Amino acid sequence: MQRVPIRFLGLVPALLSAAAVGAIYLPGALRRSAWSDDIPWLEYTEFPICYAIGRPVCAVGYKILFPVTVDGLVLLRVLGVAGIALLAAVMVSCLVNWGVPAGRATLWVVAAVLLPSFHSYAGWGAAFMMPWTAVLGFLSGLLWLKADSRKSGVWRALAIAVLVLSLLSYPPSAMFCWVYLGLRVLVLRTRPKLVLKQVLSMTWLLLVAGMGFVLIASALRLVKGIPVSYRFRTLSSAPEVFEKLVWFVSHPVVVAARPFLIDSPSNTSALLTGGPILVLVVIGLASRSSGRPVERLASLCLYATILSLTMFTHLVGVENQLEYRFMAGISIIMFAYISAAGVEIVRVASLSCLNLSQRTTGRLVTVSSLLVLILLVPFAVLRATQNIDRVFIKPYNDKEKYVQEALLGFDLDLHNRIVAISDPSFYPSRQHLGVYSTVNDLSHPWVPAPMIRLVLREIYEVHDTIKVDVVAREDTNLDSTDYVVDFRPFAQALKD
């Protein structure tokens, strides 16, 4: 019987993983919703903020594809789901070709792309390009290491071009080049000396592509005459670097060590929950490394380095904003470390504590890891579905209904201006991280005015330009031609 070529080994599990991801995320993506930036951007024809923060490819993609209606956002969310599915397929294919059993690889990757970092990609129209950017970043890492092994200048140039394109789209997701390397060295148990060589080589790729990215992004911004955003500035002093390192270790690393959890922990809670997991990861990864103690220590340092570099763009940037959509790379690598460490701890415990044979231990490890993944995936599906509904879908339906009722008395012949009473302080929030803390995006100051204009266009078919002013408190100097939309009862109802 003819053997299947190695490059086709991962095809079936890749297709299965892509289909599973689509089946999980598509139902939510197809439901009517618009969230945060989606709402004002429905009125845009240009997206200058993308140029200001160095994402010109993103600006072009929005200009071509961003719709003018809420229903049109379905296409963007479907594209986002397709990007997640493709990313899952690519990762599964690589894992299988590296020797991971197909079933385990498929279940693990499906669980990985159900981490909280990916929910925005499926539920938020404006995030649709992020998973596609991650795919490009992942492929750039693959191409670069292939270029290393083949000594091919063509492959190197292609890897650089792909990474530059990825950086120009969404820099945090472009760091998936490190996800490729991290998964590769973990699965193949690459020796520290070779890992160091590959890390240095990938760093060279990032520096070259990074210079190209900065030059192109800056040139396009200048041509457009758009001032640079504060968010595009990099660290420039020792105190900033120190503050960044403290933030990184105490926030992204700890959050990533608590997969599938979205609550905002206190320092004590973070230490008590994320701390033990990090300790077990260190123990498990050290145990599965081979060689002398110094080689094991070197392996741990390199694992930590790769984990950190998945957030390189945030490590060099001035912002310390903790948002899950920035953390897809570090979330996947930490999930891989937790998985590998867990398997190793079970293996060592079976051999030393239970005195099982190597063969029996291998079977136990296989069965237990599959069982954990089989139980984990449905749990992750439930959490993903709940998060998308609670953050993106239900809040939109609630605010659309309220604004529609609030505008029942609006008459274009009688009213020249709408005064919206709204302020971020009116709205409650959840003790969660990032977007998951938002009860309703009307708490974002840029949402109330375009939300009112959106309802006028789509529900009442009023396409005239209506002036909408947002104020924090009731104005006693209203004109008879002013129409008031008061969001305070809506905000209070969210608290009750």
Image (spheres, rainbow, N blue to C red):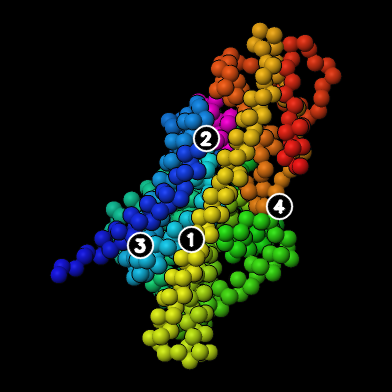
Dot 4 corresponds to which residue? 431
Q: Earlier in the sequence, mark 3 or mark 4?
A: 3
Query: What is the spatial separation of the Cα atoms under label 1 and label 3, in whole angstroms?
Result: 20 Å
Q: Position of residue 370 (x, y in %)?
A: 44, 70
Q: Earlier in the sequence, mark 1 or mark 3?
A: 3
Dot 1 corresponds to which residue? 377
Q: Secondary structure at mark 3?
A: helix
Residue 146, above or below 293: above
Q: Main secondary structure of the magenta part?
A: loop
- Give the number of marks: 4
Residue lying at the far left in this picture: please name it: 1
Magenta part of the chain: 33-45
- Front of the two marks 1 and 4: 1
Q: Position of residue 128 (x, y in %)?
A: 47, 42
Whether residue 374 is visible, yes or no, is yes
Query: What is the spatial separation of the Cα atoms under label 1 and label 2, in whole angstroms?
Result: 26 Å
Q: Secondary structure at mark 4?
A: loop
